[in-house]
Image (cartoon, rainbow, N blue to C red):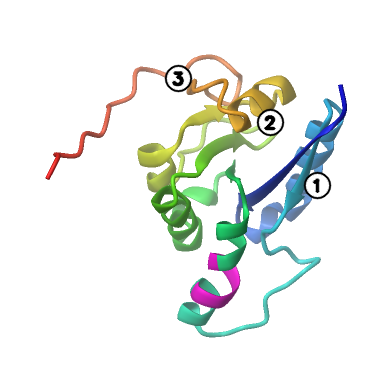
Amino acid sequence: MPDQIKNVFISHVHKDDAGLTDLKNLLKSKGMNVRDSSITNDKPNNANSPEYIKSAILGPRIDWSGCMIVYISPETKDSEWVNWEIERAHKQDKTIVGVWERGANGCEVPEALDEYGHAIVGWNADKIIDAINGDYEGFEGPDGMPSPQRAIHRHPCG
């Protein structure tokens, strides 16, 4: 079977840039090549206006992607940018997959991921790939064990 190629946006905080390389290498080892459109230190964003960054830089990159991966580390939950990126992806009905940082010890997930995520998985290439492809919708802790029952967010029909 030939390698899969996926266009993704990896939502993260910049201190985790090195972890993104590890994540992409993990997926590549199982035959999935990801083309990541997120902003990293390797391809920085030098703009200063938050509205410009959202509308002209991040927005089009999220729009281009077929899936969003949220790299979950201790600092991710407090990032306004990560929550905004997740909400943008949700408004476009993109698959949103949370992936725990390798070795994570149960930090909290961003509020928007908790509300809109399709799956949250541990550091396991097969499960990450299945979640990206829409074949797995489980919610796990960093150790790969199922998370406690989650509240279902219901929205009234209008």
- Looking at this view, is 79 or 113 the one in front? 113
Q: Residues within 10 Å of mark 3 (few under 14, many from 20)?
A: some
Picture quadrant where residue 1 is located? top right
Residue indicated by mark 3: 147
Bounds of the magenta segment: 55-59
Q: Residue at x 44, y 57 (%)?
A: 88
* Distance between the alpha carbons at the discs numbered 3 and 2: 16 Å
- Looking at this view, is 39 or 146 the one in front? 39
Q: Residues within 10 Å of mark 2 (few under 14, many from 20)?
A: few
Q: Secondary structure at mark 3?
A: loop
Q: Tell me which secondary structure the magenta stretch mostly adopts.
A: helix
Q: Residue at x 73, y 55 (%)?
A: 17
Q: Residue at x 56, y 27 (%)?
A: 134
Q: Is label 3 or label 2 in front?
A: 3
* Distance between the alpha carbons at the discs numbered 1 and 2: 15 Å
Contact? badges 1 and 3 (CB < 8 Å): no
The amino acid pointed to by label 3 is Ser
Q: Secondary structure at mark 2?
A: loop
Question: Up-down: is 59 above or below 117?
Answer: below
Q: Secondary structure at mark 1?
A: helix
Whole-percent x, y for residue 56 in the image: 56, 77
Residue indicated by mark 2: 103
Q: Which mark is residue 140?
A: none
Q: Residue at x 44, y 45 (%)?
A: 93
Whole-percent x, y for residue 139 in the image: 48, 23
Contact? badges 1 and 2 (CB < 8 Å): no
Whole-percent x, y for residue 43 in the image: 77, 69
Q: Residues within 10 Å of mark 1 (few under 14, many from 20)?
A: few
Whole-percent x, y for residue 80 in the image: 44, 61
Q: Which mark is residue 21?
A: 1
